[in-house]
Image: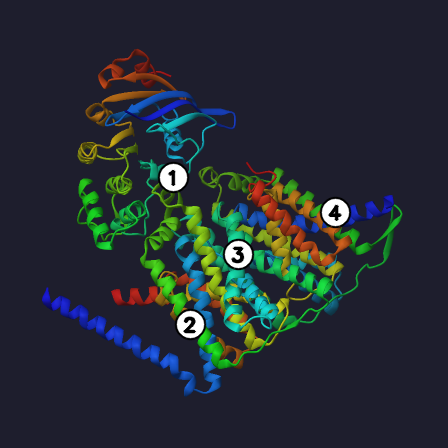
């Protein structure tokens, strides 16, 4: 089933088209990697899908339903969650409270205790169990990124958008993050991830899409895309 | 584990007992305290309520509202206009409803935007309403001041006691609920909260209007002790300033802090108005500046820092 | 309605607008560069007015001349306030948003402090004086000379400030800091000095405006608040952070205000707020905003 379908998406800021006529789809259960040089429009695309901004033209469908132009909280309720390139945690709140907020707005009728137990499960998936009572701002950047993942998971998404979760992580942290993403995938959640860390892309993605200057220039299996002439050109040339 | 359970239930029992005793005292004190003291206690309740209700919204969300005087004044005018037409309890509720509606309008227009627009809008709001009411009274009704139906200090005390209990219950319940988390989340990162399924616009507007309700009801109650009001008395910017000062002074993040701040500064006000009546604005201003510069957590924050030493 | 009537309204609007523009540019310097929304701005206006009043009534110093004393004095006071209070708030605030909030609250406290000091110094009675109140004939209608002087002074302050911003090194530093503080700092601009200077300059403009007000109107220690509100509306109208925008915003408000005053003086603030509400609903970024 096509869980996400993006057709003819354009977003212009002033005279500049950050995203210029993109078409692609994602099937349920896939892990799709989205790569491309900086400024290629990847985060803009995420913002369009999550509802943070509205497209100039084009349609976004989630599970067949048109979600174009809906507000972020409405899209979240439909089943799309995301992390942010620049971490946007609730810094003064504890690790547990960060996850609890998402969960309580997803599952409105449950007791505090039930919610806490379920949230601790989320923290376990991302490997942050035991840190519940620490203020989120005191975590290292690697743990903060994993907390963002837990927070997004608590909204019970079917599609998870990961925005450069590996940025700034050292090799062992990258390995841990890859593990976490595999755990998430094992739970049946479809993942679309923007990444620069090629190790992660190669290891986890079923498919890779390449962006450049707001356009899709290549798409296919990781090995094929990486060998693609044009892709090599834009990464090494210009 | 058994000892822990026993310890917790002992603590809860003592808290319950204390609350019971305090409630009984509060409910019966008009019987044995002098009228002057009752009025003082009522005054404390008034400031505690407007401080708690201000902090309910502006505390966690960091959307600073300077509109309390507008809501308070609307409550006062409700009392002046409706006091002779409907019974006192209804006047109080009506005062709350009028302020609620005003806050809804303000929220719908400004809470979609950055916090600074909201704060700026609320800053001039009480002045705007004062000018509008003055113009109306002068040109349409011919009177500037109005007389308010006077209510005896005992019913007023009980009314304020009830408003206080309701406000406290609402603030406490909200804080413990998912909306309490949502409000904090909005203050920390509104965009993230939006993406996690919180309808941030509805929550902001709803809680802001709720906080205005209590300010309006309090204003309607307080007016009956003044008997004479005019736009300058009703829409005094000091009523926007005081809840901010009291909450910041006591500790904006906790209900305990808000109550401590309100009680301490109201008692200080009684002192200042008798000893230094020409300096109270100056002293309040200085206190606020000092707290912002040196005591960001307020008294409660200071207490916590001392405990850590 | 005759031509002279319309001219009357327009010139009166320009006088008022010039005054508002002056206060708005001052506030815009403080918010746009130093990021302090100084709600006690009107109190500095009031101080300027009273200082001029006192110097004239006690020592006979002409209001135009006394600016040489009151201007620098208020500038220095404001500069010191920024250096002590707002610098510290900047250091202790975890984010820009927190800083803006805390400094707004601190300036709220300042409002009450300054107003109380003024009340203690000058009392709460209405004060006024006559200076150059004789009528001058311009294009067929007569104006009080002091109002024409006020217009001239507001205009020349505006032009002088514009030239300062464009041609002096400090002016360029201010424009740089207003556009992009971090880059300006990297380019060698002493950012703390510039922020303090902008705050001081903003207060200086307020003082000049206050001086003009004292020439034209009667004053009490409570006149500050409406001027603060009008300046804020003018700044939002022009676009938060845009200095030229606030000047235009002030002029527009002055013209509108004068028209409204022909029908009902008491409704002018209501009219300004209606503009404000429309602005917020339709184009919050203001005239010059993005």
Disc 3, SS:
helix
Whether marks 3 and 1 lie on the same chain = no
Disc 3 target residue: B101
Dot 4 alpha-carbon crowd within 10 angstroms: few under 14, some 14 to 19, many 20 or more: many
Q: Residue at x 34, y 64 (%)?
A: B301
Q: Residue at x 56, y 72 (%)?
A: B223
Q: CA distance from mark 2 to mark 1?
A: 38 Å
Which numbered disc covers residue C14? 4
Whether marks 3 and 4 lie on the same chain = no
In the displayed orientation, state which residue is furthest to the top. A229
Disc 4, SS:
helix
Disc 2, SS:
helix
Is label 4 or label 2 in front? 2
Mark 2 / mark 3, whichever is N-terminal: 3
Disc 1 target residue: A74
Q: Residue A236 appears at what percent x and percent y?
A: 32, 17
| Vertical position of residue C219 compared to residue A155: above or below | below
Query: Would residue B95 be found to the left or right of residue A215 on screen?
Result: right
Q: CA distance from mark 1 to mark 4?
A: 49 Å
Disc 2 target residue: B162
Query: Would residue C20 be found to the left or right of residue A86 on screen?
Result: right
Chain of the residue under label 2: B
Which quarter of the figure has residue A74?
A: top left
Q: CA distance from mark 4 to mark 2?
A: 54 Å
Whether marks 2 and 3 lie on the same chain = yes
Q: Residue B251 appears at what percent x and percent y?
A: 38, 64
Quadrant location, the C terminus of chain C: top right
């Amino acid at each position: 089933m096509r869980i996400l379908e993006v057709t003819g998406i354009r977003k212009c800021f002033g005279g500049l088209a950050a995203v210029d006529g993109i078409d692609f789809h994602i099937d349920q259960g896939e892990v799709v990697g989205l790569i491309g040089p900086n400024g290629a429009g990847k985060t803009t695309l995420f913002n369009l899908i999550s509802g943070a901004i509205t497209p100039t033209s084009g349609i976004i469908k989630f599970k067949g339903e048109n979600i174009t132009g809906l507000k972020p909280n409405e899209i979240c309720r439909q089943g799309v969650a995301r992390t942010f390139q620049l971490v946007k945690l609730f810094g003064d709140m504890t690790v547990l409270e960060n996850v609890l907020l998402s969960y309580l707005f997803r599952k409105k009728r449950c007791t505090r205790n039930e919610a806490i137990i379920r949230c601790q499960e989320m923290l376990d998936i991302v490997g942050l169990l035991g840190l519940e009572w620490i203020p989120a701002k005191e975590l290292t950047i690697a743990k903060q990124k994993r907390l963002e993942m837990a927070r997004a998971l608590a909204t019970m998404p079917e599609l998870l958008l990961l925005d450069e979760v590996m940025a700034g992580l050292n090799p062992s942290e990258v390995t841990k993050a890859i593990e976490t993403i595999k755990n998430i995938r094992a739970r049946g959640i479809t993942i679309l991830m923007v990444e620069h860390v090629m190790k992660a892309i190669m290891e986890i993605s079923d498919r890779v899409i390449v962006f450049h200057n707001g356009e899709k220039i290549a798409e296919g299996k990781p090995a094929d895309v990486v060998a693609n002439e044009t892709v090599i050109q834009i990464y090494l040339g210009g | 584990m058994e000892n822990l359970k026993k310890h917790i239930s002992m603590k809860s029992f003592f808290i319950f007992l204390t609350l019971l005793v305090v409630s009984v005292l509060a409910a019966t004190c008009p019987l044995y305290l002098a009228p002057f003291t009752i009025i003082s206690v009522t005054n404390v309740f008034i400031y505690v309520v407007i401080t708690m209700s201000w902090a309910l919204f502006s505390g966690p969300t960091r959307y600073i509202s300077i509109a309390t005087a507008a809501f308070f004044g609307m409550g006062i005018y409700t009392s002046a206009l409706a006091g002779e037409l409907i019974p006192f309890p209804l006047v109080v509720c009506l005062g709350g409803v009028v302020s609620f509606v005003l806050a809804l309008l303000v929220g719908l227009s400004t809470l979609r935007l950055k916090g600074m627009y909201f704060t700026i809008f609320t800053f001039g709001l009480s002045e705007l309403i004062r000018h509008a009411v003055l113009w109306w009274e002068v040109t349409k009704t011919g009177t500037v001041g109005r007389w308010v139906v006077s209510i005896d200090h005992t019913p007023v005390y009980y009314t304020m006691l009830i408003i206080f209990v309701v406000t406290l219950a609402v603030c406490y319940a909200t804080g413990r609920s998912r909306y309490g988390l949502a409000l904090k989340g909005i203050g920390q990162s509104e965009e993230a909260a939006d993406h996690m399924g919180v309808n941030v616009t509805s929550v902001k507007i709803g809680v802001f209007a709720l906080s205005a309700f209590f300010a309006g009801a309090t204003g309607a109650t307080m007016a009956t002790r003044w008997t004479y009001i005019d736009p300058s008395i009703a829409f005094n910017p000091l009523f926007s300033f005081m809840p901010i000062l009291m909450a910041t002074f006591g500790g904006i993040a906790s209900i305990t802090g808000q109550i401590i701040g309100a009680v301490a500064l109201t008692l200080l006000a009684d002192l200042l108005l008798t000893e230094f009546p020409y300096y109270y604005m100056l002293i309040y201003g200085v206190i606020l500046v000092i707290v912002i510069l040196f005591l960001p957590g307020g008294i409660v924050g200071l207490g916590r820092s001392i405990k850590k030493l | 309605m005759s031509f002279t009537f319309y001219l009357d309204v327009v010139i009166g609007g320009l006088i008022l607008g010039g005054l508002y523009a002056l206060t708005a540019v001052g506030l815009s310097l403080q918010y746009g560069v130093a990021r302090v929304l100084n709600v006690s701005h009107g109190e500095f206006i009031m101080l300027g007015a009273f200082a001029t009043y006192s110097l004239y009534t006690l020592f006979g110093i002409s209001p135009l001349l006394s600016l040489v004393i009151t201007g620098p004095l208020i500038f220095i006071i404001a500069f010191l306030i920024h250096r002590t209070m707002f610098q510290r708030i900047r250091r202790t605030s975890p984010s820009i948003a927190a800083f803006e909030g805390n400094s707004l609250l601190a300036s709220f406290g300042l409002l009450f402090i300054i107003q109380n000091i003024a009340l203690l110094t000058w009392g709460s009675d209405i004060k006024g004086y006559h200076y150059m109140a004789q009528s001058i004939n311009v294009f067929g209608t007569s104006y009080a000379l002091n109002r024409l002087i006020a217009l001239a002074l507001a205009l020349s302050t505006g032009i002088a400030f514009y030239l300062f911003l464009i041609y002096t090194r400090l002016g360029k530093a201010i424009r740089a800091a207003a556009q992009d503080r971090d880059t300006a700092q990297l380019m060698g601009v002493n950012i703390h000095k510039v922020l303090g200077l902008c705050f001081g300059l903003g207060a200086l403009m307020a003082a000049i405006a206050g001086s003009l007000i004292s020439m034209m109107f009667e004053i009490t220690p409570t006149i500050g608040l409406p001027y603060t509100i009008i300046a804020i509306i003018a700044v939002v109208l022009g676009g938060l952070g845009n200095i030229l925008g606030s000047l235009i915003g002030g002029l527009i408000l002055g013209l509108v205000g004068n028209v409204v005053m022909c029908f009902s003086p008491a409704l002018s603030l209501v009219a300004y707020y209606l503009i404000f509400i429309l602005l917020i609903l339709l184009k919050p970024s203001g005239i010059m905003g993005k």
